[in-house]
Image (spheres, grey):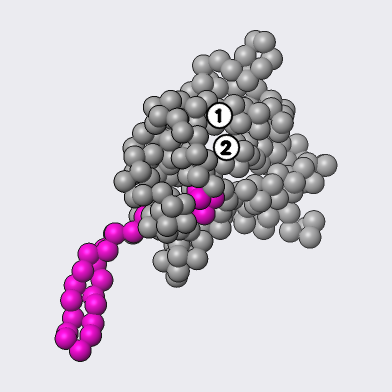
Amino acid sequence: MSLQYLQSTFLTFDQLSELTGVEPARLRGLIKAGCLPGPAYRVVGECVISSIFGDHADAVELQFFPRSYVAKVNGLVQSGLPDDELARREKQDFFARYVETLVALRVHTFGLDALYGQDGHVGGTEAEALLEKEWLAYLDGAYGLCTGTASAEDIATKEAMIAKIKFLIAAIETGGAGTLLAELEQAVDLLDQVSAPFAPHEVARSSRETYINQVRARYLAQLA
């Protein structure tokens, strides 16, 4: 079932190359340079090919990427920039869009005020550390499997809504639900919108299970 999920939801490396018209070596170069994230999933194993000639064991290695990377790869290639400059631009763009999303979501109102500097803007040591950590996770392919598009906006929204859900649940547990349940429902719904379904074998351990499925069952069922 999990392999079927990967095949229906993602693109293999070869499919990404074919759909973008970018040679495999160029794709690998973009990943190595830090311009494009690595695969969200890797499948490594052995298959048996059977025919009238008998069985033949063959090695299998597949890499799966989000479908949104088709547009991403096209944009990278069309920029015409050298890889080192392109990687710097991608990182700066990721940081800027991530911060814009945090500001738009007003994260300082639910416990993430440490990300703001004395000037009232997102910045400082903690914000810089967060952005670096998120950038590395993005390049590693982690957000290709747990968000819908692996965009900076989806990633920032996911992390912000998890923080907000934790913040609201703590407030509900200590001070009563009040009007907080409606706010909790909005946060869960937004997290749902940007989160991936996850492969069947991952769901039980995923953020979807912890912060969407379980929260809806425990706190929001009465609102349905």
Q: For residue 137, say whether it is visible.
A: no
Task: State whether residue 50 is above or below residue 13.
Answer: below
The answer to which image quadrant residue 102 occupies is top right
Q: Residue 93 got which mark?
A: 1
Q: Are marks 1 and 2 in contact (CB under 8 Å)?
A: yes
**Residue drawn at the location 65% of the way across and 10% of the way down:** 118
Residue at horizontal 43 percent and vertical 52 percent from the top: 21
| Residue type, mark 1 in image | Asp
- Asked if residue 50 is among those painted magenta in the image, a careful observer would answer yes
Residue 1 picture location, percent across and down: 45, 70
Residue mark closest to the camera, 1 vs 2: 1
Displayed quadrant of residue 151: top right
**SS state under label 1:** helix
Residue at screen point 70% across, 39% down: 168
The answer to whether 68 appears left or right of 103 in the picture is left
Placement of 119 over or under 138, stated as above or below:
above
Residue 59 versus residue 156 in the image, above or below: below
Question: Hey, which quadrant is residue 63 in on the image?
Answer: bottom left
Q: In the rendering, which numbered label is found on residue 182?
A: none
Q: Main secondary structure of the magenta part?
A: strand
| Residue 152 image label | 2
From the viewer's side, name the closer residue of 126 and 165: 126
Residue 62 in the image, given as x and y percentages of width and height: 34, 59
The earlier-in-sequence mark between 1 and 2 is 1
The stretch of residues the image draws in magenta is 44-70
User: Quick check: 27 left or right of 132?
Assistant: left
Q: Position of residue 155 (x, y in %)?
A: 57, 40
Residue 146: x and y, percent? 52, 49
Within 10 Å of disc 2 (Cα), the crowding (few <14, some 14-19, many 20+) is many
